[in-house]
Image (spheres, rainbow, N blue to C red):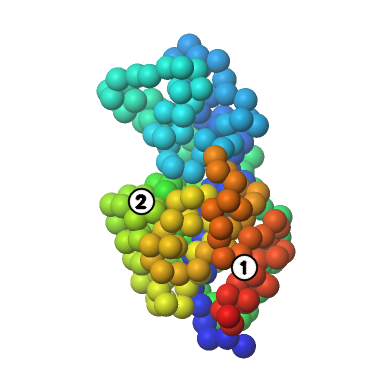
Amino acid sequence: MTSPYTLVFDLDGTLVDTAPDLITALNFVLDREGLPPVPMASARNMIGAGARKLIERGLEAEGRTVTPADMDRMTADFIAYYADHIAVESRPFEGLEAALDQFAAQGHRLAVCTNKLEWLSKRLLDQLDLTRRFAAICGADTFGVQKPDPTIFRETVARAGGAVKASIMVGDAGTDVGVARRAGVPVIGVSFGYTDVPIAELKPDRLIHHMRDLPAAAHSLMTA
């Protein structure tokens, strides 16, 4: 058995398929602006850089720009609506909980490092009964920096009680690969998440297509 590691997970598109509720919230905001909805299929890859960026991408899809004040208002409307509808359709990806059980049984620490706001992240994980599994849940506002700034990764690991040199990032997008590279740790990419650049093109150290494959991928990195 390997020494305990800290497995650090992205949230949206990695742990949980949150796209249905995020896009519903985006379309709620767009509708209030008199704009047509963004189709679910094309909007999935807009997710991953926080609420404000999601709205910006939704507006760009319609060829629209707004003033900073309007963007502030729309972002506040989005967060308020999303907070009240955060787990209507969002669900953990298939095989996640079995993988987390396996890591826990082996004594590894688990943490969440996301560009979602911390309180929204905790609300989502609470409603899905996942919060208890993680030693730390850190978001874009927790330390005042977002991925790929390595500070958020290092501080998340520290809050979880782990060591950066014995940690692995798991994520679905460029910000996750970027934060891992800058922190000097290996990264496992998941192919089922949300990204405008296919995760395989970003060359993570391991690539998985289903959560059932995560424990083996992590073990191969721990023993490399």
Identified at 35% across, 19% down, the residue is 66
Helix, strand or loop at label 2? It is loop
Say which label, 1 or 2, has the lower sequence index. Answer: 1
Q: Secondary structure at mark 1?
A: helix
Q: Is residue 36 above or below residue 129?
A: above
Identify residue type, mark 1.
Answer: Leu
The vertical placement of 88 against 78, above or below, is below
Spatial separation of the CA atoms under disc 1 and disc 2: 25 Å
Which amino acid type corresponds to the residue marked 2 in the rendered image? Gln
Residue 134 visible (yes or no): no
Which quadrant would the N terminus be assigned to in this image?
Answer: bottom right
- Horizontal relation, residue 75 to residue 30: left or right: left
In this orientation, which residue lies closer to the viewer: 195 or 36?
195
Residue 203 in view of the camera: yes
Circle 2 Cα neighbour tier, 10 Å, few/some/many (<14 / 14–19 / ≥20):
many
Task: Tell me which residue sits at (38%, 30%) in the image.
Answer: 75
For this view, does 45 lie left or right of residue 50?
right
The residue that label 2 is drawn on is 146
Classed neighbour count for the residue bearing mark 1: other residues with Cα under 10 Å, few (<14), some (14–19), many (≥20): many
Q: Which mark is residue 100?
A: 1
Q: Which of the 4 image quarters holds residue 73?
A: top left
Q: Which quarter of the rendering shows the C terminus?
A: bottom right
In the image, residue 115 sits, relative to residue 77, either above or below, namely below
Q: Position of residue 28 (x, y in %)?
A: 51, 23
Mark on residue 76?
A: none
For the point 53% across and 86% down, which residue is it? 3
User: How far from the left and from the top, in percent, is residue 183?
Assistant: 38, 66
Residue at image x 58%, y 51%?
201
State the count of labels: 2
Comparing 133 with 5, the one in front is 5
In this picture, is 120 found above or below 70? below
Residue 109 is situated, as x and y percent measured from the top left of the image, at: 50, 74
